[in-house]
Amino acid sequence: MTSTATRPAGPDHLWSVDEHLEDILTAVRPLEPIELQLLDAQGCVLVDDVTVPLSLPPFDNSSMDGYAVRVADVAGASEEFPAVLEVVGDVAAGAVELTPVGPGQAVRIMTGAPLPPGAEAVVPVEWTDGGLGEGPVAGMRARSLAPEGAEGHVRVHRPAEARAHVRARGSDVKAGDLALAAGTVLGPPQIALLAAIGRGTARVRPRPRVVVVSTGSELVQPDEALGSGQIYDSNSFALTAAARDAGAIAYRVGAVVDDAETLRATIEDQLVRADLLVTTGGVSVGAYDVVKEALAHVGDEDVPGSGIDFRKLAMQPGKPQGFGTIGPDHTPLLALPGNPVSSYVSFELFVRPAIRTLMGLDDVHRPRTTATLRAGKALSSPKGRRQFLRGAYADGEVTAVGGAGSHLIAALAHADALIVVPEDVESVEPGTDVEVVLLG
């Protein structure tokens, strides 16, 4: 899995957001299809069209507890002049042997039970005196309440039209119909349909396995005591959660100290369970930018484009980025900045589309819309950079949340959108229409 895009030459080239994304999506290919049990296929993308092998329902059946009758036998029935029918049998859901309904007769029937021969409609038990013969149907009156001489009969107080309260064979789907089209994401209703037509497995593209590695000797795991100069590792939790939200099976690796050999060994160990690797931190130009040091020279010399390319993007936040492939299977790796907002914005713009591409989805991007910037101070943006500001979106309007600093994680927690300020715009006044990326 290698990039076929033509990469601009020179370490000083300033990549656009679109160039970087195109390079990633050109390199990433959907995972190979596999056959999975239905519950294991939840969240996966169906590879082939599925047709219906049998009609649903497969037979005419009752939609109510009541009595299967002939229409002529209950014509004109009323409270004052009920139709009195002989109860000749019972039919429950799953019944095989069915008692036919003849003139002047009725058969007790339960919801979902097959319509017996000769019956043309079902009258709900609420339209009757409850019935007086033996049988399992819930809600029927007990024999002790029966009027003298009425045993084995039912009084019907209302007429019924033909096919009343009958679920017709094939009224849901018919044999040969398209059940689900290729490209469908299998959620609970789709899995229910596959089970209903007798499919125990589905051929899908599996959910990609994403491994998230954070770097930094200053990082401490939550619930541990902070020492001087230390901070809690939030990036690995945010990105792992974001990968799961995108549809992946995600694994979080605890923070790796700033040591190139340790990081390289950690990444190599994780390759066995990764369809995509994501690192955060260590991609800038500092003395301890361990990801660049560890991965700058990996790759297969015989495979053009393999290895990790570290680059600068014309965006804020998230200028330093890395992308390429690693390991014998050329597993894609995206190296993101370490500041929390930079890391998360980079994930939404680049990693999420890569995950959705691996899944085989056609639409891999977050939805975008146009919104009016609400009253407040004007937004400023550096010239030549595409800026992504946190925002709260509602009813066609968006409000900036927090400042532009890439460390402002609290503001990120209250945002549900990204406000996009183009490269050629340096100021956005309130009341201006802006592009918005909807995050949730």
Image (tube, rainbow, N blue to C red):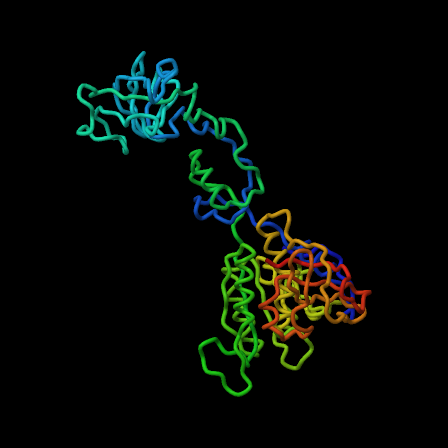
Which corner quadrant of the image does residue 17 belong to?
A: bottom right
Q: Nearer the viewer, residue 37 or 310?
A: 37
Kindly give the residue lying farthest to the bottom in the view shown.
Answer: 228
Q: Is residue 304 visible?
A: no
Residue 411 screen position, x and y as percent:
61, 71
Q: Residue at x 46, y 27 (%)?
A: 55
Q: Is residue 111 left or right of residue 21?
A: left
Between residues 106 and 202, which one lies in front from this camera angle?
Answer: 106
Q: Identify the image quadrant of the N terminus.
A: bottom right
| Placement of the C terminus among the 4 image quadrants | bottom right
Residue 274, given in percent of the width and then of the height, sits at 53, 60
Picture coordinates of residue 78, whole percent (x, y): 36, 20
| Residue 54 lies in quadrant | top left
Question: Where 75 falls versus 333 (above or below)?
Answer: above
Q: Is residue 146 left or right of residue 41?
A: left
Q: In this rendering, does residue 240 appear at all?
A: yes
Q: Is residue 24 above or below residue 266?
A: above
From the viewer's perspective, is 58 left or right of 31?
A: left
Q: Give the vertical position of 40 relative to 401 (above or below).
A: above
Residue sitting at 70 percent across and 54 percent down? 369
Of residues 157 and 153, the one drawn nearer to the viewer in this rendering: 157
Total tally of numbered discs in the picture: 0
Q: Nearer the viewer, residue 76 or 234?
A: 76
Residue 180 position, x and y percent, is 54, 37
Residue extending furthest front? 80
